[in-house]
Image (cartoon, helix red, strand yellow):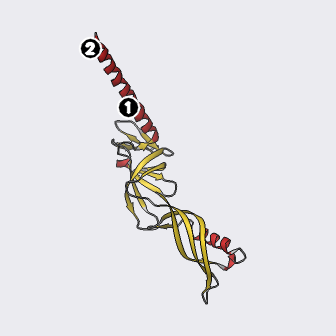
Amino acid sequence: MFYIMDLEEYIRVEPELFGLETKDAIMKQLDKTYTNFFDKEIGAVLFVLEIESIGEGIIIPGDGAVYYNTSFQVLTFKPELQELVYGVVDEITNFGALVDLGIIKGMLHISQAMDDYVNFSKSNVLTGKNSKRALKKGDLVLARIVALSFKGDEPKIGLTMRQPGLGKLEWMQEDKRRASQAKAKVEKGEETERKGKKK
């Protein structure tokens, strides 16, 4: 889920940025500090939106930098259990697929790719045994986050597509079309039955 978060901390502005306006120097330092930043509490920082306030600068003896108590806003992505996420299949392996969620990647185990027995082919495609549905690199998917681990530098995200309404977007459109055709067929049958009773 995406969040706009208000943060406050002392920002260390390095001496090489002293020639800039204070706000510009702090923004450059924030961009440098928060690029590719992930924290369990706030999530993955996409970028700093704005600086809200800057306190007086503090110099610490022996350190050539200046520290400014700064309030600022960041846009973050923090994965949540049971959240629905759109993604692009980035890689197919013999144990499943890596799905690029835009900011971070999730793991879709082969057993969670579809509600079918799934085979891995040498051409890097996951194929359902009965449905003949195929999942390959570049496919757009809708999945649910079913596992989260925050050990290490990046979170580990486990995904599933074995629930109704999830899967490759083309499969979902195909299912919708079939359901619509089945509904039309039932309605046509009911109409024929009513006409038969009137005679």
Residue corresponding to mark 2? 197
> Quick one: SS at disc 2?
helix
Q: Along the horizontal axis of the image, is 189 left or right of 42?
A: left
Q: Residues within 10 Å of mark 2 (few under 14, many from 20)?
A: few
Residue corresponding to mark 1? 179
**Horizontal and vertical percent for residue 108?**
40, 51
**Horizontal and vertical percent for residue 77?**
49, 60
Q: Nearer the viewer, residue 125 or 38?
A: 38
Q: Nearer the viewer, residue 106 or 61?
A: 61
Whichever of callouts 2 and 1 sits on the residue coming sooner in the sequence is: 1
**Residue located 55% across and 65% down the image:** 74
Q: Nearer the viewer, residue 154 or 163?
A: 163
**Residue located 67% across and 71% down the image:** 24
The amino acid type, in three-letter code, at marker 1 is: Ala
| Figure quadrant of the C terminus | top left
- How far, Cα to Cα, is label 2 from label 1? 27 Å
Q: Nearer the viewer, residue 70 or 39?
A: 70
Outermost right residue:
19
Q: Along the horizontal axis of the image, is 4 left or right of 181?
A: right
The amino acid type, in three-letter code, at marker 2 is: Lys
Outermost left residue:
197
> Quick one: SS at disc 1?
helix
Q: Name the front one of labels 2 and 1.
A: 2
Q: Is residue 8 visible?
A: yes
Please tell me in which quadrant of the rendered image residue 11 appears. bottom right
